[in-house]
Image (cartoon, grey):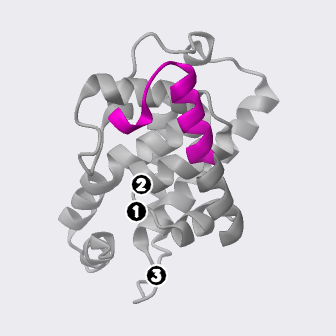
């Protein structure tokens, strides 16, 4: 699988600011959805997204190699920043307005964005998102990274710092749990 991010990042490192702009455009929707999956607060997710790209701009730590995935590197940064924000919020014992209104009355547009065109119909995306929200966080994370963001199980293992066998188990159990949740709601998973 071709990782276009590496080429854009190389351009940025060579002084082409447009490379960074294109990187942001390429990854911002998937990263925002991924971050939101952790923090459950849209404003905080947007802040973390900005911090992720700011880190990329200032630290420039990724060393492009043939076997390295830039997307995996970027998702690791976002995951670490999300976990740090959750720790900080827990220490402050804040409750966001988004958390108080869960389950959401209206699914934000960024949750229904599908870079692969898999869920083009908005209603189906809302049904699927509502079912995903009811899953265990590990299942939701693995399924989101795999099917929304297109990461391979190996890349998911790298992002989440879990071994590959656990990722395959989470994906299999997550799919089964999602199917059961959809059936419980009277939905046929085949139609989605």
Q: Which residue is mark 1?
A: 57
Up/down of 51 relative to 119, above or below: below
Q: Residues within 10 Å of mark 3 (few under 14, many from 20)?
A: some
Q: Measure the C-alpha gap from mark 1 to mark 2.
A: 6 Å
- Magenta-drawn stretch contains 153: no
Q: Which residue is mark 2?
A: 53
- Magenta-drawn stretch contains 181: yes
- Tell me the SS state at disc 1: helix
Query: Is 133 or 6 nearer to us in this picture?
Result: 133
Which of disc 3 and disc 1 is earlier in sequence?
1
Q: Residue at position x 33%, y 54% from top?
A: 27
Which of disc 3 and disc 2 is earlier in sequence?
2
Give the residues drawn in magenta, as a range. 174-192
Direction from residue 11 to residue 127 in the image, left or right? right
Up/down of 166 relative to 30, above or below: below
Q: Are marks 2 and 3 in contact (CB under 8 Å)?
A: no
Q: Residues within 10 Å of mark 2 (few under 14, many from 20)?
A: many
Q: Quadrant of the C terminus?
A: top left
Q: Which x, y percent locates residue 181? A: 58, 28
- Tell me the SS state at disc 2: helix
Q: Measure the C-alpha gap from mark 2 to mark 3.
A: 19 Å
Q: Which x, y percent locates residue 88? A: 73, 36
Q: Residue at position x 31%, y 69% from top?
A: 5
Q: Are marks 1 and 2 in contact (CB under 8 Å)?
A: yes
Direction from residue 170 to residue 65 in the image, left or right? left
**Residue 41, can we see it?**
no
């Amino acid at each position: 699988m071709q990782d276009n991010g590496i080429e854009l990042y190389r351009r940025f490192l060579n002084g082409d600011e447009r490379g960074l702009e294109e990187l942001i455009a390429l990854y911002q929707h998937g990263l925002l959805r991924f971050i939101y999956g952790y923090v459950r607060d849209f404003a905080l997710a947007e802040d973390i997204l900005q911090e992720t790209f700011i880190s990329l701009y200032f630290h420039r730590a990724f060393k492009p190699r043939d076997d390295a995935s830039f997307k995996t590197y970027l998702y690791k940064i976002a995951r670490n920043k999300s976990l740090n924000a959750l720790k900080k919020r827990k220490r402050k014992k804040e409750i966001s307005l988004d958390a108080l209104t869960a389950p959401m009355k209206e699914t934000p547009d960024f949750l229904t964005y599908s870079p692969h065109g898999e869920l083009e119909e908005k209603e189906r995306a809302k049904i699927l998102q509502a079912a995903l929200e009811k899953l265990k966080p590990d299942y939701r994370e693995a399924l989101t990274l795999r099917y929304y963001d297109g990461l391979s199980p190996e890349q998911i293992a790298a992002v989440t710092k879990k071994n590959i066998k656990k990722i395959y188990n989470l994906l299999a159990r997550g799919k089964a749990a999602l199917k059961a949740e959809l059936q419980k709601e009277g939905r046929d998973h085949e139609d989605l």
